[in-house]
Amino acid sequence: MALTALILANLALLLALLARLKAASAADAAESASTDARRYASNAEQTLTYEVKRLRSLVARLADGEDLDGQMVRDDILWKDVDLNEAKELIAQGKVALLDVRTPQETSMGIIPGAQLLPMDDIDDRKHELPTDKPLLVYCAGGGRSASVCEHLSDGPYQLMNLTGGFGSWDGPVERPS
């Protein structure tokens, strides 16, 4: 009888231990779900804050009379792609400042005359050097990096244009960087 009682007591203790482990596991799962929910809510808040900031910037630019077209508004893009012919016309009229975001190795063979050289990797540290008094025509070798720079700078005080095709499409005058 004592042996049966001891076996039953051990069995009850084992069942209690298993129940406690299951409860602890459930508590861990609930805490993990709570952490995930907080992270999701925080990410959603950050995304919403960013989107509101972008919309305010877009509305402000429209209110300031900036020439934004419907597609830019629909796509939430605060910069324009310009082709070679439009770029040449804007440069000839002195309506844009030029920004070359290629590396020094790439620019050593030539740049569009008058371009400010600011490699893409240095943009964050040196964006205070960029002019804000006229639109910036940004270019790289093929147009991809310059589009990324335009997107990156678009929440700042700059009116941005990306030369589609980049320097590779340029058939105008070229000068050596100083």
Image (spheres, rainbow, N blue to C red):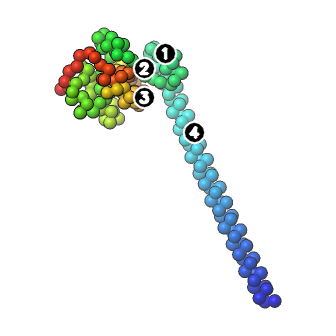
| Residue sitting at x 63%, y 52% | 33
The foreground one among 124 and 14 is 14
Q: Are marks 2 and 1 in contact (CB under 8 Å)?
A: yes
As measured in the structure, the alpha-carbon distance from the residue carrying label 4 to the one carrying label 3 is 21 Å
Q: Residue type at mark 2: give it.
A: Lys
- Percent x, y of residue 146: 36, 27
Q: Residue type at mark 1: give it.
A: Asp
User: Marks 4 and 1: which is nearer the front?
Assistant: 1
Q: Quadrant of the C terminus?
A: top left
**Mark 3 or 2 closer to N-term?**
2
The foreground one among 47 and 102 is 102
Q: Which residue is mark 4?
A: 44
Q: Residue type at mark 3: give it.
A: Glu
Which numbered circle lies on residue 80? Answer: 2
Q: Vertical placement of 171 versus 142: above or below? A: above
**Mark 4 or 2 closer to N-term?**
4
Q: Quadrant of the N terminus?
A: bottom right
User: Marks 4 and 3: which is nearer the front?
Assistant: 3
Which numbered circle lies on residue 69? Answer: 1
- Percent x, y of residue 42: 56, 43
**Mark 4 or 1 closer to N-term?**
4
Q: Vertical placement of 20 versus 10: above or below? A: above
| Residue sitting at x 79%, y 86% | 4
Determine whether the residue tagged by mark 2 lies in a helix, strand or loop: strand
Which numbered circle lies on residue 34? Answer: none
Determine whether the residue tagged by mark 1 lies in a helix, strand or loop: loop
Q: Vertical placement of 3 versus 81: above or below? A: below
Determine whether the residue tagged by mark 4 lies in a helix, strand or loop: helix
Q: Which quarter of the picture shows residue 176?
A: top left
Q: Residue type at mark 4: give it.
A: Ala
